Image (cartoon, grey):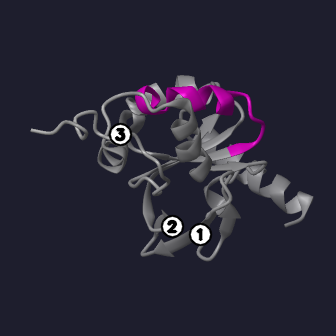
Amino acid sequence: MSQTCHLFLELLYLIECLNRYFTKPTLLSSTLPLIEETCNVEDALLPGLAVLDYTPSITVFVPSDSALLSGIQCNETLPEEDALKVLDAHTLKGVVAYSPLLVDGAFFRAAGGEEINISVSNGTKYANGAKIIREDIVIKNGVVHVVDRVRQVQPFCTNIFADLTV
């Protein structure tokens, strides 16, 4: 897409934002606790969030709290390496993909190398089959979309009681 087209889409997005309440964008790690669907995400992914706070031009398809709880099955902070793997599978670097770019058939390459394919069904947008339940949360260095599933990236934090035998 041409630079002019990107600027036009960003201008359209700004106009849309002005039509609703708009606050000054903050860092990703400061924004997630304020979003109802992601207020506990920071607890699990804290080590990786610090890296993304200062990465320029990002789009993060952040899993909701309920998605993380069922997806990683862990009630504690993930080790930094695992947190980074999860975040890389959900993050586009060098691309700020506001909702006008999330059209049926669009695809992007996540920081971890996986493709993120966008589909639209009956007006609902999906990223690799994960429903986008909240769009266009502006952060200081990009945009966040909340999704209802965690992309399966191994290893995840395992249950701390899994190794106990009776």
Q: Residue at 68% across / 54% down in the picture?
A: 97
Which label was assigned to residue 65?
A: 3
Q: Residue at 82% across / 57% down in the picture?
A: 6
* Viewer-closest of 152 and 117: 152
Residue 126 can be seen in this image: yes
Q: Where is residue 18 in the image (x, y as percent from the top left)?
A: 63, 39
What is the quadrant of residue 69 in the picture? top left
Residue 22 can be seen in this image: no
Q: Is mark 3 on a helix, strand or loop?
A: helix
Task: Identify residue for label 2.
Answer: 128
Whether 53 is drawn above or below 127: the answer is: above
What is the quadrant of residue 19 in the picture? top right
Task: Identify residue for label 1.
Answer: 117
Whole-number angstrom distance, CA of label 2 to CA of label 1: 5 Å
What is the quadrant of residue 122 in the picture? bottom left
Cβ atoms under marks 2 and 1 closer than 8 Å: yes
Tell me the crowding category of disc 3: few under 14, some 14 to 19, or many 20 or more residues within 10 angstroms, Cα based: many
Which label was assigned to residue 3?
A: none
Whole-number angstrom distance, CA of label 1 to CA of label 3: 22 Å
* Viewer-closest of 62 and 82: 82
Whether 144 is drawn above or below 49: the answer is: below
Magenta-colored span: 42-58
Task: Tell me the quarter of the image containing the N terminus.
Answer: bottom right
Q: Residue at 47% across / 56% down in the picture?
A: 151
Q: Does the magenta stretch include residue 55?
A: yes
Whether 9 is drawn above or below 138: the answer is: below
